[in-house]
Image (cartoon, rainbow, N blue to C red):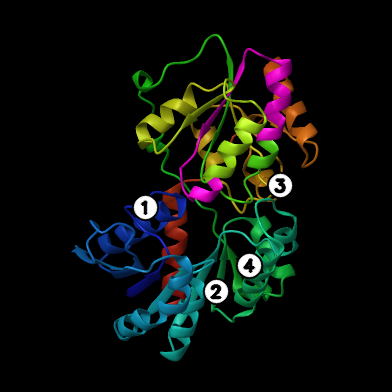
Amino acid sequence: MTILFVLENYFPNIGGVETLFKSLAEQLSRQGHQVIVLTTQLEKKDPRLETKDNITIVRYPFKNRYFFTFFAIFPILKWLSKVDIVHTTSYNAGLPAFFAAKIRRKKVIITFHELWGDLWFRLPYMSGFGAKLHYWFEQFLVKLPFDRFVAVSNSTAANLEQAGVPKDKIVVHYNGIDYDDFKVDSSLAIKDEDHFVYTYFGRLGVSKGLDLLLAAAKTIHKKYPHSKLKLIIPTSPFSFFDDIIHTIKKYELEDHIILKHHLPFETLKAEIAVSDCVVVPSYSEGFCFAAVETMALGVPLISSDQQALREVVGGKHIKMTDLSVDALANAIEKAIRGEWQELPVQRFKLKDTVQKYMNLYKKMVN
């Protein structure tokens, strides 16, 4: 087979989706299949064309994800004569991948990482107009007749079906991680024995509940001066990061919050491992790599218990009783007091995820 991946971002960009598709490409290559990855050139130093073994990576200098949505169709059409099947993801890559594939009569699969629906109108950091545009785009994308919709959890699958996707077109493939990657070099971070450290790590997303977390931290800071919030976040998008810094100053949390940015993976793991717990206060999660990675490191977890978090969270954990500042503050207080609940820890193995995708490709092509 020759498979075309149409992806907004790819390695060397680091993230759960990038890890999945890089692993897919490498496994397919080892089995003798050809893989073409069409993606964005994020840095000028990244080669525009890169070939290794059976993998060809083609990077185009789209200015942002919206340019990718509207202009990627032209390079996709150029490469489609060489491929058997197209695999893309929600959101921005899905549109050009679908129309190009249908023009060339190629089968096309989309992986939906999550589906928000009406949640767009309840999220912070978004204007009313912006919420409407994103909602309409999502509704349009989910109505397109892709040959298969891959949901990364049962929760996402249920949302797809509710949105009108035929049940027989939906398959569930949980995302996965390589557990061998989650061994920690303890010399890379020092545990703060004098403070209870609760940590958030991940991207700056409107659904991540950072507004709830900072407001709850204001309460925790006053009641528990021996506590600290560690925020491991990127500095982009700059406007979002600027809002976070403004809120920290507004709530007078400068002495309560430890800010860290762009850590190497080994250092990130160590910083998480020396935390007393990790907080995932998201409004929605389609799978949640942060939760699965936290459990892999054996660190307790505070969860908003929204969507797929109900499926993946185990080990020592505390669930928020509702999606509010008070509920999050109460959950953090329980963590400080050591009032953890416990469930068996599920394992989501990357090799299992990769094998399911490979089986799907073979089924679709034959």
Type of amino acid at the residue the image marks with label 2? Arg
Range drawn in magenta: 214-240
Res 177 → quadrant? top left
Instruction: Identify the disc placed on residue 176.
Output: none
Type of amino acid at the residue the image marks with label 1? Asn
Q: CA distance from mark 3 to mark 2?
A: 25 Å
Type of amino acid at the residue the image marks with label 4? His
Q: Is residue 277 left or right of residue 350?
A: right
The residue pinned by badge 2 equals: 148
Q: Secondary structure at mark 3?
A: loop
Res 300 → quadrant? top right
| Mark 2 or mark 4, whichever is nearer to me | 4
Type of amino acid at the residue the image marks with label 3? Gln
| Mark 1 or mark 3, whichever is nearer to me | 1
Q: Is residue 252 left or right of residue 320?
A: left
Q: Are marks 2 and 4 in contact (CB under 8 Å)?
A: no
The residue pinned by badge 4 equals: 134
